[in-house]
Image: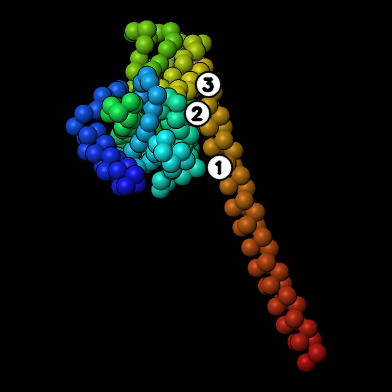
Amino acid sequence: MTERFLKMRIIFCIIFSLFHGTSSKTINVATNGKVTLQPLVEGEIESILWRHNGNKMVEWDNKTVNVREYFKFKGRTKLDVKTGDVTIIHLAKDDSGLYDTVLIIQGKLISIRHRVEVIDPVTTAKVTCPSNATLHCEAKGDFLDYSWFGPGLQTAEMRGQTGPQISKENQDSVYTCVVHNPVSDSSVTYHASDCFTSGYHQLILGVVCAVIGVIGAAAGLGYYCYKINSRVMYLFLNNRAETHWK
């Protein structure tokens, strides 16, 4: 009778939470990070059920005592039966979604909802200077937002991957690219003079490679001519020797 009552109560809790749940703002969490969801309730808790996108995640009641985890959340949750807080670790992208809990406190049903978004953090930002001398900033991650800071800008801040255009007049300037998303950020500074230095180095490298290529080709041609001459000389001497013995 008790087990049947518990099952009926859980089903009722689930149906109740679909229509009566206090919502909270979205919580952004970094991939492989952790999050603690808090119902923030008062009173002695008799039963707790946490779900993810409608599927059971973890539950507890004061009749069976033991905490039960389900499916992919096994070994990844920690439930505080005094407060109803649940901590989830090793978050992955497919852990994003709606989390809801139904608690029974002194016979009263309380439903709370949380939305979690698991986001890849920003990788190390990198600034390059293409041939047109316009700085370009790049990083990897989700929901990236780019900002530029430095002298010579029309405003105190520029936005977007494309940064300021460098000229020889402002090559002493230093610019900073900041890449931000809801869970992390990365910044990198770039000396404008490097834009011209890198181009000069690329030119020198191109010339050196061209010279090495010419020398290599000449060496190959010389070796080929040497082999041909050696073959001709061999045939000439061999033919002369045969004529002498005849």
Front residue of 230/16: it is 16
> Where residue 124 is drawn, which disc sits there?
2
Tell me which residue sits at (46%, 14%) in the image: 175
The outermost residue toward the right is 245
Question: Quadrant of residue 156 in the image?
Answer: top left
Front residue of 67/65: it is 65
Residue 122, percent from left and from top: 45, 29
Q: Bin the neighbour count of mark 3 within 10 Å (Cα to Cα): few under 14, some 14-19, many 20 and up.
A: some
Tell me which residue sits at (65%, 68%) in the image: 228
Tell me which residue sits at (24%, 39%) in the image: 12
Inspect the image, locate mark 2, and give the three-letter code of the amino acid beneath it.
Answer: Thr
Q: Bin the neighbour count of mark 1 within 10 Å (Cα to Cα): few under 14, some 14-19, many 20 and up.
A: few
User: Mark 3 against mark 2, which lies toward the viewer?
Assistant: 2
Question: Quadrant of residue 169 in the image?
Answer: top left
Label located before the other in sequence (2 or 1): 2
Q: Is residue 162 visible to the viewer in this orientation of the structure?
A: no
The outermost residue toward the front is 1
Dot 2: element: loop
Inspect the image, locate mark 1, and give the three-letter code of the amino acid beneath it.
Answer: Ala
